[in-house]
Amino acid sequence: MRRIAHALASLRWRLTLTFVGLLALLLVLLAGYQYITLRASLMSNRVAELQTDYNSARRLIATEAVKLGVTSTTIRRLCVTHPAILADAVARAVSAVTGQTVQVVVYNGALTQMAEAPAGADTPHLGSAALESVVDRGVRSSAEQVTTASGAQLVVGFPVVAGLGSCGVAQLSIAMTSITSVLHDELFLITLGGLVMLVLALVLGTLLTGRTLRPMRRLTATAEQLAAGDLTARSRLAPSGDEVGQLATSLDHMADRIQEAFTAQQESEGQVRRFIADASHELRTPVTALKGYIDVLRRGAGRDPGALDAALAAMSNEAERMRGLVLDLLTLARLDARRESHPETFDLSDAVDSLLDEGVPGMPDTLQRNFATAPVLVHADRGAVTTIVRNLLVNACKYAHGAAQSWTTAVEAGWARLVVQDSGPGIPATDLAHVFERFYRGEKTRAREEGGSGLGLSIVQALARAQGGDVAIQSVEGAGTTVTVWFPLAPPATG
């Protein structure tokens, strides 16, 4: 029973049984309509036969009346004075025409039974309302089915016409046996055919739904694989326009996005771990140096003014270096959090010129400013642009100490371009591909001594892309370095 219940709970069997149930309902409705229509048709045909028999009986009476020289006036008189004679004539004529297969009962105008043939039979009778309707209207009554001891009878009343009026009712009835037999045979055939069709529908429906739902089973297996952690699982069903095909496409797309998101999350977590490890390493160096100087001072070096000044100066440098590193880390954290920037329109040349005027330690003697003659209006966060220019200037002064620098601004292909070029020692090819990575330094020892953290170019790239621009670097070892930064131009003024 549990197996049957489990099978019936499946979508395949629910669809099949729903289809078969709907087909059974339609077959029942069709069979009912066909049964009622056939019954009405058979009864209509039998009533038409009774009408033909009655018309033949009337012609027979008319023929006999002519042979006996009985006029229509005499017939009308008989209808009033001797209705039993006329009724008997009608009854005998109908029996003669039908061979006594039809029972006939004749009533006079007062609906009193005057004659019956064959006599003594279990004769049905129409209701008084139906008989009165025949007498009053002079037309045939509706066919009625009357149940008697010998079985169901089909009964119809016909007017006995004499002259221009009706003087009685001739009730003809016949057994429903033949009609019932035909209906029973038809019902048996309909039932048998319906059962055969339902069995075929059940078998074919099971096969068709199984084939139709086969992709669903594949989708279920794919979903289970994904749930188990296999993010490479795909249904790989051929694209189609039906609902199953759309579901398969959506599932595969969802799996692609989940895999991409999971991969991105793993990469992000790896970057965070590396970032924390690198930051911890970089902060450990100045903290260790500060602790060492403090230990030296505790051991009595503070009593020597020269040693004290040297220790305090070194501690100040380490603290400043740690402060710069913390500020760089905060800048990267804000960029990673994608905090909202505040873009505005300003002249890039003026902003760069002002920052070069402020300068940084280690400014070269030769610094060319090749600014565009027309204003280079950019739409960016002024603070971000300031940080980008300052970091580029610090890097150029630190790693190309004393080398000539050239700063250029221009408008090119719909972008504002800032180019910083120095004639320093350049960057080795092995290091050039990694210069934008956080904490990466090609000359680690010299950079650390000079206070570098390896975050400058990473911040430049992140800030440039956050403004909708980008940055690129070109360098040849021994021939200098060129850094190019692109910013989005301000939209043209309207009105």
Image (tube, rainbow, N blue to C red):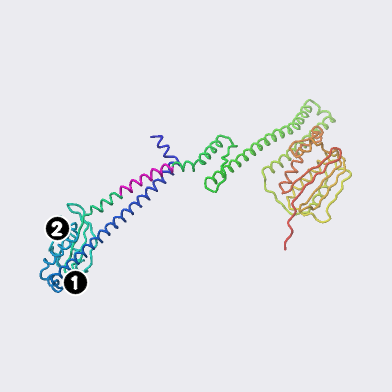
Q: Which mark is residue 270?
A: none
Q: Which residue is mark 2?
A: 118
The residue shown at (28%, 56%) is 42
Question: Who comes first in sequence, dot 2 or dot 1?
Answer: 2
**For residue 404, which quarter of the picture?**
top right
Q: Main secondary structure of the magenta part?
A: helix
Which residue is outermost to the bottom? 73
Which residue is outermost to the left? 81
Q: CA distance from mark 2 to mark 1?
A: 27 Å
User: Hey, what amino acid is under mark 1?
Assistant: Gly
In the image, 42 versus 113, the foreground residue is 42
Q: Looking at the picture, does residue 366 appear above or below residue 64?
A: above
Q: Looking at the picture, does residue 386 appear above or below residue 154?
A: above
Q: Which residue is mark 1?
A: 165
Where residue 153 appears, x then y in whole percent?
A: 21, 55
The residue shown at (85%, 30%) is 306
Which element is circle 1 on?
strand
**For residue 128, which quarter of the picture?**
bottom left
Which residue is outermost to the front? 67
Instruction: Tell me the quarter of the image containing the N terminus.
Output: top left
**For residue 47, which quarter of the picture?**
bottom left
Of the residues tagged 2 and 1, which is closer to the observer?
Answer: 2
Instruction: Tell me the quarter of the image containing the C terminus.
Output: bottom right
The reply to whether discs 2 and 1 touch (Cβ–Cβ < 8 Å) is: no
User: Hey, what amino acid is under mark 2?
Assistant: Pro
Q: Residues within 10 Å of mark 1 (few under 14, many from 20)?
A: some
Q: Residues within 10 Å of mark 2 (few under 14, many from 20)?
A: some
The residue shown at (57%, 43%) is 238
Asked if residue 480 lies in the magenta stretch, the reply is: no
Which element is circle 2 on?
loop
Where residue 273 appears, x then y in whole percent?
A: 67, 34
Find the magenta span and give its range. Answer: 187-205
